[in-house]
Amino acid sequence: MELRVDPTEPVLAAGQILARGVSRHLAHLGFATLEEFVPDRGMRVDVMALGPKGELWIVECKSSRADFMSDSKWQGYLPFCDRYFWAVDQQFDTDLLPADSGLMIADGYDAEIIRMPREDKVAPARRKKLIQKFAFCAARRLQSLRDPQAGVHWG
């Protein structure tokens, strides 16, 4: 399903709409976010968030029951974050989601943290590598926006 929050903006898929609301909410909490971030080979998380104290959060955005049920790789993301969240819209049956993970209710404008998961700290060496990769990816994305002809890819 494709949704458009503002008719002057590009058409976004439902999961992208949720990711935008999540990113806006986390920005209000002092986090920097990257959507569709690759923490390690073979992985792609919907939202990776870097907090003001170096905390790392992953948020997976699920637009439907089928979307959630088809995701069998999410547990592999846990070693790459201090806290793991699901973000869903108000119509989503949240009883489907694991009770020990975080929960956000989101739309294209904002989100709200409904359930804070327990913190499980990322190993220091992995944290350093992830923060460096986050910074590199963010810088490359910014560079590609400023100079699209430079041939820089998001990574």
Image: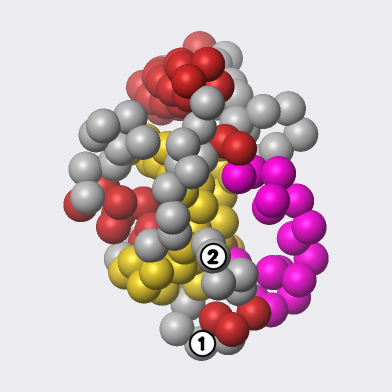
- Name which residue lies at 68% across and 52% down: 74
- Relative to 30, residue 65 above or below: below
In this view, 74 is above or below 63: above
Q: Name the residue at 43% across, 48% down.
A: 119
Q: Residues within 10 Å of mark 1 (few under 14, many from 20)?
A: few
* x then y, percent, for residue 147: 41, 18
The reply to whether residue 118 is in sight is yes
Task: Identify the residue shown where x is 67% and y is 28%.
Answer: 40
Residue, disc 1 = 91
Circle 2: element type: loop
Q: CA distance from mark 1 to mark 2?
A: 21 Å
Say which of marks 1 and 2 sits in front. 2
19 left or right of 61?
left
**Residue occupying image coordinates x 73% and y 27%:** 41
Q: Nearer the viewer, residue 43 or 80?
A: 80
Residue 131: give x, y in percent of width and height.
Answer: 44, 22
Is residue 73 in the magenta section?
yes
Magenta residues, start to end: 62-78
Give residue 136's mark: none
Question: Is residue 88 placed above or below 148 in the rendered structure?
Answer: below
First along the sequence among labels 1 and 2: 1
Q: Amino acid at mark 1?
A: Gln
Figure quadrant of the N terminus: bottom right
Kindly identify which residue carries mark 2: 100
Q: Is residue 17 visible?
A: no
Which residue of the protein is positioned furthest toward the top in this rendering?
150
